[in-house]
Image (cartoon, rainbow, N blue to C red):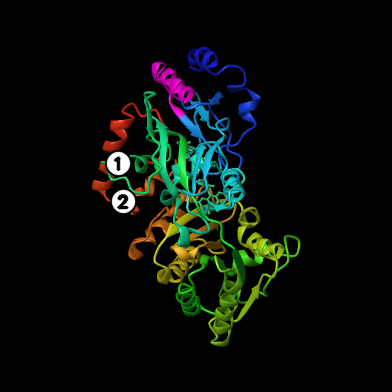
């Protein structure tokens, strides 16, 4: 199959535009484990027109196409099978323009999130979507997964930051919807078809992002709380702080692993019910810090917090964030594991975690459970290992996690998407009419199911 379309694609993209052999084999399509790329070829267009050309050639040959951004997605969306074409956006990595007054950044889809953040910073702006994989994840990937991350509670998910975009449909049609305006009610807002569509409706090639003014104050603290009521009281109080930008939770099993001496210093002793990283980013450098510390003192005095450490320098702020973002250490410590990304009401989270723990103990005595997440926006990530048998027991573990959400009306995917790994459980969060309408949209835009054919459904 590969030999049929390869000459035409090579002629279109030229030297360096096509990778085969070891250049394909050495890559993984998953960030936390080695998942070989099964496709024989990776094509690397430089322009939207070249993306369109590749899709036309794929259509002529009846080939399916899997899109790759930074391959940091954790739902298997980048996985491929033999005979497919991988289309990587890695050579479409240009920041095209920045408008500091309109706070607008125009970028190609293969720009990394970190590079977009850096470009914003250099222009006196701040691009607020942020996540641990910022150095590798692409902005096209963040659009396609509607990535959330660390500061969603203040500035929203990727959907809230995209003003316009350009995408190529399965038949090679270029849909340029590069809107720059905040207000533009002129029919369907087409960008939303592609945000969070996980590459099933089109390949995003360029986009227009809305950033914010760069904050002038930045404070970070790690807080220990004694029980769930205290965690909720902490969140309730901190939401009155206008500069609150993150409220991130770590349950003790995870906190212990990521703060073992060989990993990094432990900022607060063990023994708390949960640990919360709280962050304030504001525009009143002189008073933000005092306000932040005053609230923490109030919370300590009232017993809502039992202990807290406030970072005193950039290095200490980075160190506290490192504790929060050392998830990979915990993943490797309990591997093999299955990972989950769910959301449910903040007040329900602790009860739900208790339910999952109880069910695991019942069915898999000795199971390991690590929990962390962006609890300020309803979102926790769970990692579960039942030992060497974990992969074989994945369905039973899925059932505990996903069925457990039903009484709480939770979502089985908060920010990571469905990919190729969670399709069987979509019905937990979407009803039959919703799934049927999604299929209608898919059929209208990609009737031959050529783009990311195993994703979502
Ligand atoms: C350490 C770590 C921390 C993370 N933290 C977070 C977090 O806090 N919040 C969060 O939301 N996610 C998080 N993630 C998951 C991941 O980083 C995001 O899903 C990210 O948006 C994926 O971007 P990517 O470029 O790597 O996409 P990929 O993994 O390459 O692709 C993801 C999906 O999008 C499709 N796709 C990619 N680019 C395009 C495009 N241009 N057009 C159409 N479809 C495309 C792919 O086909 C695939 O289905 C984390 C991952 C890691 C490894």
Residue 25, quarter of the rendered image: top right
Camera-side residue: 107 or 299?
107
Residue at 36 percent across and 23 percent down: it is 171
Residue at mark 1 to residue at mark 2: CA–CA distance: 10 Å
In the rendering, which numbered label is found on residue 438? Answer: 1
Residue 385 in percent (x, y) is at 56, 56
Residue 94 in percent (x, y) is at 57, 34
Q: Characterize the magenta stretch by its predominant secondary structure.
A: helix
Residue 225 lies, with reference to residue 125, above or below; the image says below
Residue 324 in percent (x, y) is at 61, 62
Residue 64 part of the magenta-drawn span: yes
Secondary structure beneath dot 1 equals helix
Residue 265, quarter of the rendered image: bottom right
Question: In the shown orientation, is residue 121 left or right of residue 62?
Answer: right
Question: In the shown orientation, is residue 297 left or right of residue 399?
Answer: right
Can see residue 32? Answer: no
Residue 186 part of the magenta-drawn span: no
Tell me if mark 1 has few (under 14), some (14-19) or many (20+) residues whose alpha carbon lies within 10 angstroms of its own: some
Quadrant that contains the C terminus: top left
Kindly check if marks 1 and 2 are in contact, taking CB atoms under 8 A apart as contact: yes
**Comes first in the chain, label 1 or label 2:** 2
The extreme front residue here reads 101
The extreme right residue here reads 262
Q: Which residue is mark 2?
A: 430
The extreme bottom residue here reads 301
Residue at 35 percent across and 40 percent down: it is 193
Can see residue 156? Answer: yes
Mark whose residue sits in front, 1 or 2: 1
Start-end of magenta stretch: 49-65
């Amino acid at each position: 199959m590969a030999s049929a379309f390869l000459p035409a694609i090579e002629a279109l993209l030229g030297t360096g535009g096509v990778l085969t052999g070891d250049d394909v084999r050495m890559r993984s399509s998953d960030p936390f484990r080695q998942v070989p790329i099964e496709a024989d070829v990776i094509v690397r267009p430089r322009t939207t027109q070249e993306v369109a050309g590749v899709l036309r050639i794929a259509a002529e040959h009846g080939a399916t196409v899997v899109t790759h951004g930074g391959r940091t997605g954790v739902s298997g969306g980048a996985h491929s099978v033999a005979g497919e074409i991988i289309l990587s956006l890695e050579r479409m990595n240009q920041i095209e323009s920045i408008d500091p007054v309109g706070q607008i950044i125009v970028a190609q889809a293969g720009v990394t999130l970190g590079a977009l953040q850096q470009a914003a910073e250099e222009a006196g702006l701040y691009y607020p979507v942020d996540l641990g994989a910022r150095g590798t994840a692409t902005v096209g990937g963040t659009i396609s997964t509607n990535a959330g991350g660390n500061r969603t509670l203040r500035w929203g998910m990727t959907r809230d930051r995209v003003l316009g975009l350009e995408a190529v449909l399965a038949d090679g049609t270029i849909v340029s919807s590069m809107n720059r305006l905040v207000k533009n009610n002129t029919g369907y807002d087409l960008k939303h078809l592609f945000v969070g569509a996980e590459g099933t409706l089109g390949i995003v090639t360029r986009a227009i992002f809305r950033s914010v003014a760069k904050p002038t104050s930045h404070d970070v603290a790690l807080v220990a709380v004694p029980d769930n009521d205290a965690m909720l009281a902490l969140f309730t109080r901190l939401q009155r702080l206008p500069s609150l930008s993150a409220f991130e939770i770590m349950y003790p099993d995870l906190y212990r692993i990521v703060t073992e001496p060989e990993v990094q210093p432990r900022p607060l002793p063990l023994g708390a019910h949960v640990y919360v990283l709280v962050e304030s980013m504001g525009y009143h450098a002189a008073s933000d810090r005092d306000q932040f510390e005053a609230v923490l003192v109030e919370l300590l005095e009232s017993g809502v917090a039992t202990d807290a450490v406030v970072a005193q320098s950039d290095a200490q702020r980075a160190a506290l964030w490192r504790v929060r973002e050392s998830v990979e250490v915990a993943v490797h410590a309990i591997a093999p594991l299955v990972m989950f990304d769910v959301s449910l009401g903040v007040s329900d989270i602790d009860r739900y975690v208790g339910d999952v723990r109880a069910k695991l103990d019942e069915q898999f005595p000795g199971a390991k459970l690590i929990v962390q997440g962006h609890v300020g926006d309803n979102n926790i990530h769970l990692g579960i290992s039942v030992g060497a048998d974990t992969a074989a027991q994945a369905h039973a573990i899925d059932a505990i996690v996903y069925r457990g959400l039903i009484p709480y009306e939770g979502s089985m995917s908060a920010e990571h998407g469905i990919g190729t790994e969670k399709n069987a459980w979509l019905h937990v969060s979407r009803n039959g009419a919703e799934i049927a309408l999604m299929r209608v949209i898919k059929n209208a835009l990609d009737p031959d199911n050529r783009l990311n054919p195993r994703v979502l459904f």
